[in-house]
Image: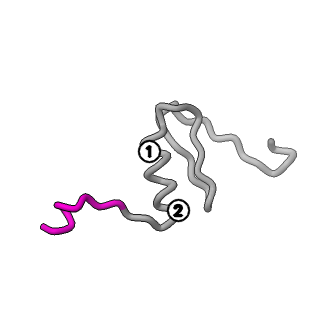
Amino acid sequence: MKAAGGEYVEVPADEVVVDGNLVTAPAWPAHPRWLAEFFKVLGLRIEHEQAAMA
């Protein structure tokens, strides 16, 4: 990876790594956090209908 210009980052299985518009994670336990970070990169915001009305 280093020869190709990449950097290896070791994180726990439930953590994510964000680098610019790249969002990645080492394993499935990170799916909730991965989705949250991916939505941030896309500029999305999820709101519950009742919360939006309050």
Picture quarter with the N terminus = top right
| Residue at 42% in and 42% down | 32
User: How far is mark 2 from mark 1, CA to CA?
Assistant: 12 Å
Q: In the image shown, does 21 or 54 lie closer to the viewer? A: 54
Specify whether 15 is left or right of 26: left
Specify whether 18 is left or right of 53: right
Looking at this view, name the residue that lies furthest to the left.
54
Q: Residues within 10 Å of mark 1 (few under 14, many from 20)?
A: some
Q: In the image shown, does 34 or 53 lie closer to the viewer? A: 53
Q: In the image shown, does 30 or 45 lie closer to the viewer? A: 45
| Residue at 58% in and 51% down | 23
| Badge number at residue 51 | none
Report the magenta residues as a range. 46-54
Picture quarter with the C terminus = bottom left
Residue 17 in the image: state x and y as whole percent.
56, 47
| Residue at 60% in and 45% down | 24
Residue 16 in the image: state x and y as whole percent.
52, 43
Identify the amino acid type marked 1: Arg
Looking at this view, name the residue that lies furthest to the right.
3
Residue, disc 2: 41
Identify the amino acid type marked 2: Val
Residue 38 in the image: state x and y as whole percent.
51, 55
When asked about the image quadrant of residue 19, the answer is bottom right
Q: Residues within 10 Å of mark 2 (few under 14, many from 20)?
A: some
Reply above or below: 54 against 17.
below
Residue, disc 1: 33
Label 2: state its secondary structure: helix
Q: Earlier in the sequence, mark 2 or mark 1?
A: 1
| Residue at 57% in and 40% down | 25
